[in-house]
């Protein structure tokens, strides 16, 4: 443990909560090792927003650390992320011990709660700086703003997925449930989107990661009883292209969050000059030495590049790799746990963007592209992944009264094709159970041709119903 955390053994306290051994040394060690808060009691207010949660009767409750100055009830405060134009009146101030005890004010160095009439946690972002609002407004208010506390950065969505109701008529109920959930989770971004298939209207949501997405989906089911279709997750991509009419070397950048905005090679000017970049992360894997070979192979298959390897002792090793974020969010955590029998642990951090030869694999049902099923992968894997997904879709899409053609395309090239056969009725048998017989053979041909035309009309009008298994076919690598 000391090796993993890079600690000095002399700094480790020998304690046991069960037997009481060394418990009396903990609080003195906290006082000795943790420095006291530093701040200016007479300076303008600067309070760091540590956390926030939504109370149904009081609104947003903020947990703050007062760095400079003081905050008291009836003060008018603003947040740096919102600017001086939006202000709130402090209704209640107190400390947590552990229940809420109202004190009326918080001094420099204290940590407590503040209720200021905020209506959503989107107005109370973690790490933001609170300060006293200047009554004059305008330029005078901006000039009176103190410098913000360091370390604040808005949460960026690292993963995007679309949520659709099972019944298109339940969209309003789904939107209401999502809006209620986001009152407590300001890191989720939500916007409406429509599907070109029978999925109808849905919501495009941005999450911090795969676990965040799974918890959000589970809360929709458990707290609101909302059954939904969750599409395969995608990551934001950066499109870099030469600036039209600009000087040599000047480029324009834009971030796309949905594959519907992916540049089309057939219609995009100077497509070959485009550079597509994807987010990458630095992955740290702590694993037993006996699982080193299997995990290394797993990381390399996902386009991982080794940066470092550290042997902690004879039994454990730390691997540091750079991997595309898209390869991590699909199933990397589960694979690492499986190949190591649960002994390996995985952690990651953002490492910017990197360019690669990426292509969009489009999935089409009866010639109609389904953005919710399309995905992005490396060009070398496009044909193999297209065949895999098309075959899995064939096995999970329910048969209809009309034929379903599944195609996987890269640009204009079809890399895979599967067919779901329709239900067939024997039209050569009459209602009485007797076969159509006698007379000219054209009589049978007429009935078969009539059936053929009927199925053709059904194929043109009918919509393919998709289940959650269809989207899991894109995510799962099994």
Image: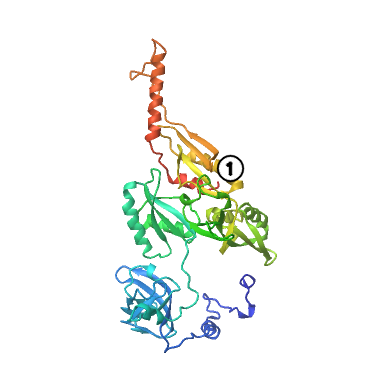
Q: Nearer the viewer, residue 357 or 75?
A: 357
Q: Is residue 369 above or below residue 349?
A: above
Q: Secondary structure at mark 1?
A: helix
Q: How is the image coloured?
A: rainbow
Q: Position of residue 476 (x, y in %)?
A: 52, 48
Q: Nearer the viewer, residue 259 or 330?
A: 259
Q: Quadrant of the N terminus?
A: bottom right
Which residue, given by chain and number where applicable, does mark 1 sit on?
383
Lateral position of residue 263 relative to residue 309, left or right: left
Q: Decide: few, some or many residues near mark 1? Use Cα within 10 Å; few <14, some 14-19, many ≥20.
A: some
Furthest residue in direction right, as rendered? 314
Does residue 210 show up? no
Q: Position of residue 116 (x, y in %)?
A: 33, 75
Q: Residue at x 46, y 44 (%)?
A: 470
Does residue 446 show up? yes
Q: Residue at x 36, y 58 (%)?
A: 178
Furthest residue in direction left, as rendered? 57
Q: Position of residue 342 (x, y in %)?
A: 58, 57
Q: Position of residue 75 (x, y in %)?
A: 33, 82
Furthest residue in direction top, as rendered? 439
Q: Is residue 434 above or below residue 477?
A: above
Residue 345, by quadrant, is bottom right
**Tally of marks:** 1
Q: Nearer the viewer, residue 206 or 470?
A: 206
């Amino acid at each position: 443990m000391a090796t993993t955390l890079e600690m000095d053994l002399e700094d480790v306290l020998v304690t046991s909560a069960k037997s009481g051994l060394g418990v009396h040394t903990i609080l003195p060690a906290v006082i000795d090792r943790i420095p006291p808060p530093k701040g200016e009691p007479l300076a303008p207010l600067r309070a760091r927003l540590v956390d926030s949660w939504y109370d149904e009767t009081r609104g947003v409750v903020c947990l703050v650390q007062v760095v400079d100055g003081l905050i008291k009830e009836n003060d008018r405060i603003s947040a740096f992320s919102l600017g001086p134009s939006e202000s709130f009146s402090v209704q209640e101030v107190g400390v947590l011990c552990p229940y809420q005890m109202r004190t009326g004010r918080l001094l420099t160095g204290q940590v407590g709660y503040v209720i200021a009439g905020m209506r959503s946690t989107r107005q109370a972002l973690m790490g933001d700086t609170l300060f006293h609002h200047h009554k004059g407004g305008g330029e005078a208010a901006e000039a009176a703003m103190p410098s913000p506390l360091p370390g604040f950065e808005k949460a960026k969505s690292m993963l995007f997925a679309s949520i659709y109701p099972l019944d298109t008529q339940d969209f309003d109920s789904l939107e209401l449930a999502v809006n209620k959930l986001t009152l407590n989770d300001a890191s989720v971004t939500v916007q409406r989107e429509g599907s070109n298939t029978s999925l109808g209207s849905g919501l495009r949501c941005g999450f911090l990661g795969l676990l965040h997405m799974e918890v959000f989906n589970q809360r929709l089911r458990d707290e609101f009883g909302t059954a939904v279709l969750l599409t395969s997750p995608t990551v934001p991509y950066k499109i870099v292209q030469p600036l039209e009419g600009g000087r040599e070397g000047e480029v324009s950048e834009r971030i796309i969050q949905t594959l519907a905005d992916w540049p089309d090679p057939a219609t995009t000017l100077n497509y070959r000059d485009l550079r597509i970049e994807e987010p990458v992360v630095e992955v740290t894997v702590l694993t037993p030495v006996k699982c080193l070979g299997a995990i290394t192979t797993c990381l390399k298959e996902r386009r991982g590049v080794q940066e470092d390897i550290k042997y902690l002792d004879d039994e454990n090793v730390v691997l540091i790799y750079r991997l595309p974020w898209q390869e991590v969010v699909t199933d990397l955590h589960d694979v690492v746990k499986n190949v190591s029998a649960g002994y390996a642990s995985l952690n990651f951090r953002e490492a910017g963007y990197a360019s690669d030869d990426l292509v969009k694999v489009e999935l089409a049902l009866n010639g109609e592209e389904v953005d919710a099923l399309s995905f992005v992968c490396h060009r070398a894997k496009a044909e193999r992944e297209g065949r895999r997904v098309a075959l899995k879709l064939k096995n999970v899409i329910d048969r209809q009264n009309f034929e379903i053609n599944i195609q996987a395309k890269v640009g204009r090239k079809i890399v895979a094709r599967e067919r779901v056969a329709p239900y067939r009725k024997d039209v050569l048998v009459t209602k009485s159970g007797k076969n159509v017989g006698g007379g000219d053979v054209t009589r049978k041909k007429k009935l078969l041709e009539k059936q053929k035309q009927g199925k053709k009309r059904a194929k043109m009008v009918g919509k393919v119903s998709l289940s959650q298994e269809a989207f899991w076919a894109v995510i799962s690598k099994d």
